[in-house]
Image (spheres, rainbow, N blue to C red):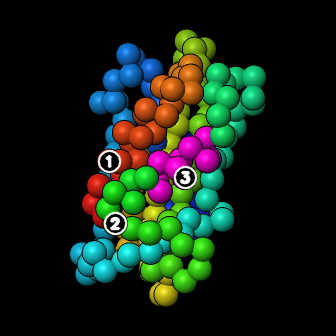
Amino acid sequence: MVKVLKGSMVAFLMLGLNIHALEMNDIKIQNSKSQKVNLDGYKTYQITKDSGIISRLNAKETTVKMDVNLEIQRIINNELAKKGKILVKENPDFLIAYSAGRDIEKDENATEKPESAMALVLIDAETGVVIGKSTAEADAKGLDDDSLTKRLEYAIKKMLSNI
């Protein structure tokens, strides 16, 4: 799989979207958090402005009509609200940086195999230290808005489960 994001916030790790009667067991999730940090002490957060979707697909290659960035942020905000975390515009306790993307590769039979990925990183706003990270990956193929939303909700809930 092509690495979609390189940088200081994460070595890009994957979230995928595959349609097989909306099975979720193909989505591979990995979570980790700092053993030295009590995440209960973090109450407010902000999503970084650099977060977003990176895609090598053009608009003709997708059936998705919604703004996926806004949908990801909505799901993150909903999941964190359930955990008592509050979205703020300034002076957050922690930052969330995310990146998601898709790429199409062709296998030896020249069939397209879309791959999708997402990474979430939690960063202490005062120190800049990574306090948690989560990734997910799977293959993606022909999702409509409703299917994509359900799979994103499942993946992001699992990705934020250790907060």
Give the label on residue 158, or none.
1
Q: Between disc 3 and disc 1, whose residue precedes?
A: 3
Q: Is residue 74 magenta?
A: yes
Q: Is residue 28 visible?
A: yes
Q: Between disc 2 and disc 1, whose residue precedes?
A: 2
Residue at x 34%, y 57% (from the top left corner):
82
Q: Is residue 49 left or right of residue 162?
A: right
Q: Amino acid at mark 1?
A: Lys
Residue at x 63%, y 27% (from the top left corner):
64
Which image quadrant for residue 21?
top left
Percent coordinates x, y for residue 77 in the rendering: 47, 56
Q: Amino acid at mark 3?
A: Gln
Residue at x 29%, y 55% (from the top left corner):
161
> For the residues marked 3 and 1, what is the alpha-carbon distance in whole angstroms?
15 Å
- Taking depth in this image into account, of 79 and 12 the one nearest to the observer is 79
Dot 1 alpha-carbon crowd within 10 angstroms: few under 14, some 14 to 19, many 20 or more:
some
Dot 3 alpha-carbon crowd within 10 angstroms: few under 14, some 14 to 19, many 20 or more:
some
Q: Is residue 121 left or right of residue 112?
A: left
> For the residues marked 2 and 1, what is the alpha-carbon distance in whole angstroms?
17 Å
Q: Which residue is mark 2?
A: 84
Q: Amino acid at mark 2?
A: Gly
Residue 63 higher or lower than 35, as above or below: above
Percent coordinates x, y for residue 73 in the rendering: 54, 52
Q: Which residue is mark 3?
A: 73
Camera-nearest label, 2 or 1 = 2
Residues drawn in magenta: 68-77
Badge 2 marks a residue whose secondary structure is loop
Q: Between disc 2 and disc 3, whose residue precedes?
A: 3
Residue 60 higher or lower than 38, as above or below: above
Badge 1 marks a residue whose secondary structure is helix
